[in-house]
Amino acid sequence: MEALFEKYQQKLNHTSLDFVRGVMDEINWNARLIGIKGARGVGKTTLLLQYIKLHLSKEPELSLYVSLDNIWFSANTLSDLTDRFVKSGGKYLFLDEVHKYPGWAQELKNIYDDYPALKVVFTGSSLLEILNARADLSRRAVVYHMQGFSFREYLAIETGITFEQLSLQQILENHLNEATAINAKIKPFQYFNNYLKQGYYPFYKEEADLYQMRLGEVINMMLEIELPLLRGVELAYIHKIKQLLVIIAESVPFIPNVSKLSEKIGINRATLLTYLHYLEEIGLTRNLFKESQGISRLQKPSKIFLENTNLIALLASGNANVGNVRETFFANQLGYRHQVNFSEKSDFLIDNKYTFEIGGKNKTSKQLQDLTNAFIVSDDIEYGFQHKIPLWIFGFMY
């Protein structure tokens, strides 16, 4: 355990507090068992270490951070570590990458039941199944989901200015005043295109010229390690799944014809639909359906986007469709807090109430004339008017 504690202190010493994600304040850190899910690379580890540094650093011996893919666990169990930690006075245990530890759910349940004074926070892949785990952690764990940077968070890092989060209602009712206040401090379009290409994943700050290479590595890790490990996907199919992601990246956007697609990439229909479901689970795509209830993994999505615009910039290799980029940004930023569905009359139906059509600065509201709660979202405009709203301002929602 001493070796683990030493590595933990080294990580803590190198953790910066220059910028702290907004999700830090959304988590109820008083809960006894907290789970944080999210795609690889969105900043889960940094969040844990920042919390420790901000709130637990005065008594460092009371907390311990470990990654469960550490080789130490090849000869030791999580239960043994926990027992030793509690007996030495430990109160706060932070477990990273739990999905890489066999039997993690059962051991976490036992730890929760056997050490009532211990608080545990764990992170894992977006594919982490809490509700379906045999140990039934759903009754014990409070689970949160993390995304990459919003445009608002990206601006905070790039400009040093922290803007308030805006609710959907604030944007719909008061977007002109909100846009005016923001434009008085910065020019959104000075930063917007850079964010769309390489501002979503926190590691963009480390070495900007290597960002796309690192993002490619993240995608490969998801496809070649997490999908086979957690969903049993055969490695022989990974190349075809990559082909599928490129097709989605270059589409206008992608409305799947499953029969033709399965024939084109050589995967049968049922397997293809299952893989489309897995790609959304892992955080690489966002699948839109007409109905929000009773969606099964064998139901065909009405429209498919990549999860964020940085993935398009990487996978489309200069062939990105501007309409696809706009809609992907909108779906990503809205999807963090709201229900996003396919609409036959426009581009999106949000919360089964609001209709949105996405386009450029000359987009008109002609096709929305007979709809209530309908809005035009336009790129390339700094300010909106009435039901026409700038696209960029939806990046201030988290």
Image: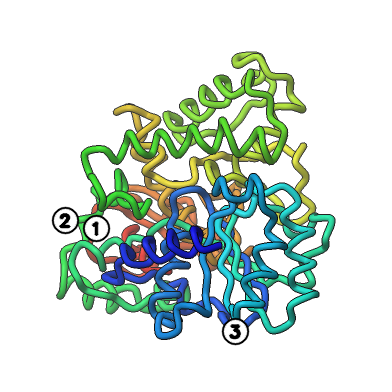
Determine the residue positioned at 76% across, 56% down. Answer: 293
Among the 4 quarters of the image, the one containing residue 218: top left
Count neighbours of disc 2 (C-alpha within 10 A) and say few if under 14, some if 14 to 19, many if 20 or more: few
Q: Residue at x 25, y 53 (%)?
A: 205
Front of the two marks 1 and 3:
3
Where does residue 169 sit, x and y in percent of width and height?
47, 76
Vertical placement of residue 284 versus 44, above or below = above
Q: Position of residue 213 (x, y in %)?
A: 33, 33
Structural distance between the alpha carbons of marks 1 and 2? 13 Å
Q: Measured from the top left, where is residue 221 in percent x and y?
A: 51, 36
Where is mark 1, residue-wise? 381
| The one of 122 and 205 positioned closer to us in this rendering | 122
Q: Earlier in the sequence, mark 1 or mark 2?
A: 2
- Dot 2 amino acid type: Gln
What is the C-alpha distance between the residues marked 1 and 3? 43 Å
Q: Nearer the viewer, mark 1 or mark 2?
A: 2
Label 3 Cα neighbours within 10 Å, binned few <14 / some 14-19 / many ≥20: few
Residue pointed to by mark 2: 190
Query: Could one spot residue 248 in this view of the protein?
Result: yes
Nearest the viewer among 191 and 203 is: 203
- Mark 1 secondary-structure assignment: loop
Q: Residue 120, relative to residue 297: is it above or below?
A: below
Relative to 338, residue 347 above or below:
above
On the image, numbered disc 3 is attached to which residue?
A: 30
> What residue is at 49 percent from the left and 56 percent from the top?
368
Q: Quadrant of the N terminus?
A: bottom right
Is residue 152 visible in this depiction of the protein? Answer: no
Where is residue 367 drawn, in percent x and y? 48, 51
